[in-house]
């Protein structure tokens, strides 16, 4: 007996090891799609069982009886394909998703990025995985919006990334197994990036929509890297950066203290069985 486990994402692709086993007829578990059933001959009681579900009772029964298992190899990125398909299904319902635009989603993208940074700072691997997924959703969502406008789709996004990586990383096109020289790698990346962008200014590529402090810091860093003499650097810009850093630190500390007080009040109320706080409840449980 043999159990052939198909890839649920690519069910019509039979593992090469099973090619000579399915010609005489097979049985199917219930979830095997119709497109697969049409390609193969169904024979009740056949020695070969096809399934896409390794936990199916019929699969387990045959395995326990000593059946050989032939499984489709796992392909890296399969779950990314499934994620894109889920995004398409969400879109097909014509609900909230189809009312969104690149602009209306932009604040979610910023929020998810900061939440990802929080997960990195806390060294929380489970949180990091979840936040990366939320950021991936933004990529899929924006790509789906573009696809609906017939400008590009998620495959175009991936193809553009692959092309960029291949162009900027010359070792990808060679029989290099590594490790490679990191300094050489960085030089090659910068040289090819400069040629690819053909930038007119050392400031090209800086995102001007970022917060003022980070924008100023990026501009100063680029100017320094380009060799701008220090006497040409605006004094008010450097003073502004210092003042901004101090203000940022003070505001962050005050905000975190406020957050701690809110959480303390919630914990106090929860300990007394109160889960929804009104005005008077906040006052009662507010930490002194």
Image: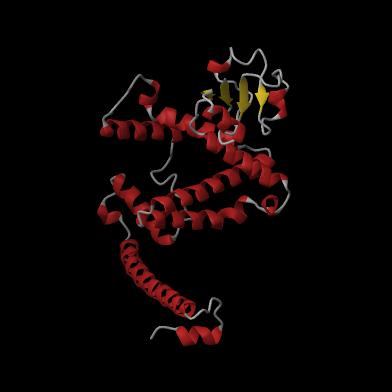
Residue drawn at the location 27% of the way across and 33% of the way down: 182
Residue drawn at the location 53% of the way across and 31% of the way down: 159
Residue 189 as seen in the image, left or right of residue 70: left
Residue 119, compared with residue 91, is above or below; it is below
Residue drawn at the location 46% of the way across and 78% of the way down: 271
Residue 284: x and y in percent read 48, 87
Tell me, yes or no, if residue 242 can be seen here: yes
User: Looking at this view, is 257 or 2 the one in front?
Assistant: 2
Q: How many marks?
A: 0
Residue 239: x and y in percent read 31, 65
User: Looking at this view, is 282 or 197 the one in front?
Assistant: 282
Q: How is the image coloured?
A: secondary structure
User: Looking at this view, is 14 or 262 the one in front?
Assistant: 14
Residue 144, compared with residue 67, is above or below; it is below
Tell me, yes or no, if residue 215 can be seen here: no
Image quadrant of residue 8?
top right
Residue 10: x and y in percent read 60, 28
**Which of the image's four quarters has the N terminus?**
top right
User: Looking at this view, is 92 or 192 the one in front?
Assistant: 92
Q: Residue furthest front?
A: 65
Residue 21, compared with residue 147, is above or below; it is above
Image quadrant of residue 183?
top left
Residue 246: x and y in percent read 32, 69
**Which of the image's four quarters has the C terminus?**
bottom left
């Amino acid at each position: 007996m043999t159990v052939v486990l198909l890839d649920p994402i690519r069910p019509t692709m039979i593992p090469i090891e099973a090619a000579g086993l399915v010609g005489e007829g097979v049985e199917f578990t219930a979830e095997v799609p119709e497109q697969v059933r049409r390609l193969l001959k169904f024979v009740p009681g056949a020695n070969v069982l096809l399934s896409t579900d390794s936990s199916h009772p019929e699969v387990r029964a045959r395995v326990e009886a000593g059946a050989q298992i032939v499984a489709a190899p796992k392909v890296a990125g399969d779950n990314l394909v499934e994620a894109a398909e889920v995004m398409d299904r969400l879109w097909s319902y014509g609900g909230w998703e189809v009312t969104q635009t690149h602009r209306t989603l932009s604040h979610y993208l910023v929020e998810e990025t900061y939440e990802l940074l929080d997960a990195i700072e806390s060294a929380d691997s489970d949180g990091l995985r979840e936040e990366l997924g939320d950021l991936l959703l933004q990529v899929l969502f924006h790509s789906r919006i573009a696809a609906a406008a017939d400008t590009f789709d998620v495959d175009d996004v991936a193809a553009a990334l692959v092309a960029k990586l291949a162009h900027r990383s010359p070792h990808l096109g060679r029989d290099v197994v590594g490790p490679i020289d990191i300094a050489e790698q960085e030089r090659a990346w910068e040289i090819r990036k400069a040629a690819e962008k053909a930038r007119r200014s050392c400031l090209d590529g800086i995102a001007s929509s970022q917060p003022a402090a980070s924008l100023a810091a990026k501009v100063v860093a680029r100017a320094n890297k380009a060799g701008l003499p220090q006497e040409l650097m605006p004094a008010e810009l450097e003073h502004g950066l210092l003042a901004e850093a101090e203000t940022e630190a003070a505001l962050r500390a005050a905000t975190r203290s406020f957050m701690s007080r809110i959480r303390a009040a919630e914990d106090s109320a929860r300990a007394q069985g109160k889960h929804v706080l009104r005005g008077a409840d906040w006052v009662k449980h507010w930490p002194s």
